[in-house]
Amino acid sequence: MNLSYFIAKRISGVKVDSFSGTIYKIAVASIGIGLAVMIISFQILQGFQETIQEKIISFGGHMQVTKFTLSQSFEEDPLSKNVEFFKDYEDYKFIEHIQEYAHKAGLLKANNEVLGIVLKGIAPSYDTSRFDRNIVEGRFLHPNDSTASNEILISKNIASKLNLHLHDNTLMYFIQNPIRVRKLNICGIYETGLEDFDERIVIGDLKLVQKINDWPDSLIGGFEVYVDDFRKINQYEKKLSDLVNYDHYVEKISDKYMEIFDWLALLNRNVVIFLTLTLAVASFNMISILLILIMERTQMIGTLKALGAKNKQIRKIFVYNGMIMIAKGLILGNLIGIGFGLLQSNFQILTLSPENYYMKYVPIYWNIEVIVGLNILIFLVVSLVLMLPTAIISRISPIKSMRFN
């Protein structure tokens, strides 16, 4: 039997109403609260990042392929969809899905109000599952290959400005020579909370844009490309650039909306700083608590030394004792952190203002690897720190310690 571990277990089971018991509870609580705060912080920050990222990607894919041009217009120069990488994209393992689109600027008129918008035309290949979470009323439009649909999907922001409701009809003016007007029906209303989309984007049929521009069915504005792993987007950008024609331009969604993605990346630095501070506080608490426990057990240390116990054996007693406290603290922290995540995921207890936070409630992102990693990191770091306060044991004299009161 490991004598040091046996004694550590015995002294860790002290009565809760004693001084040692109070110190023990403080140690367990400090570790537990520290871990719980870190788990909750990662859940919320990653949830926030994932929610914003998914909303942007639902509008533009992971990458976009357009005709190379120096124009800064909302509308794209047309390109042919009869290209090899589109027709046979299943042959490329890193490409998950490709869909066609085209933009057309115009004016939306309703109830004596006029608003400048950009119509995004989509094809039947559009993956609606990525966008469904943004719809707050109605449904997504159903484009088909035969005729141009007169259905559109507008944002809640645009609907409020023009006093429009689900199934209302509205006129859209396309400013060109000659000016063209289309009567369109609202089949759905969406909301992302992102001003870049909610203030100007209306989703319609790609065939409508093709007719307005006098394009044949083979011409489109561009492709939205979804890949199997967004974390490898830089690597996949190079692969896709090698597949497209020389006059095509490949742009990552993270470059197109650089300011938003840079802001999201900045949050990762805050997480690292917060994690470092939490670990420092937990380590300091354990050093202080272990020093107190050593001072309280001075007579026991003297007795063990008088009986022939070596400093190394006695130090192990307090290290084991500290590790037991850490383990119990981790269990408490996991219960609090994971419990909060489950409650928030299922009941959305904490709500937010969509105007300020781009979402209606605090998001939770489940990453088991991060939770396990935090547990291992805290256990290893704080356990190593426990070696520092136990060094004082070698300086304790058996004779003086047995007289210690």
Image: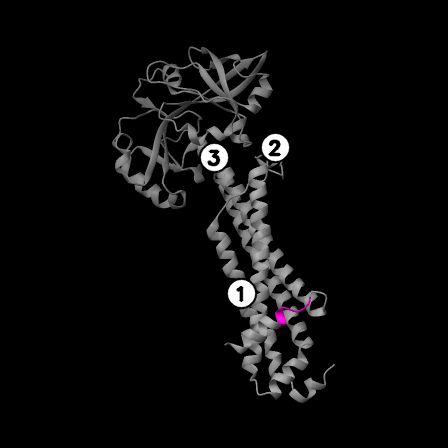
> Would you place residue 86 above or below residue 296 in this image?
above
Depth check: give the residue in front, 164 or 28.
28
Depth check: give the residue in front, 118 or 289.
289
For residue 251, what is the image quadrant? top left
Q: Is residue 265 left or right of residue 99?
A: right
Residue under the image location 31 percent in, 19 percent down: 217
> Would you place residue 391 above or below residue 225 in this image?
below
Question: Which amino acid, by three-letter code, is at mark 2?
Answer: Glu
Q: Earlier in the sequence, mark 2 or mark 1?
A: 2
* Magenta stretch in the rendered image: 11-15
Q: Are marks 2 and 1 in contact (CB under 8 Å)?
A: no
Does residue 247 appear in the picture of this structure? yes
User: Which residue is situated farthest in the right direction here?
Assistant: 405
From the image, give the main secondary structure of the stretch colored magenta: loop
The residue that disc 2 covers is: 355
Residue under the image location 56 percent in, 38 percent down: 346
Residue 381 — which label?
Answer: 1
> Would you place residue 43 above or below residue 247 in this image?
below
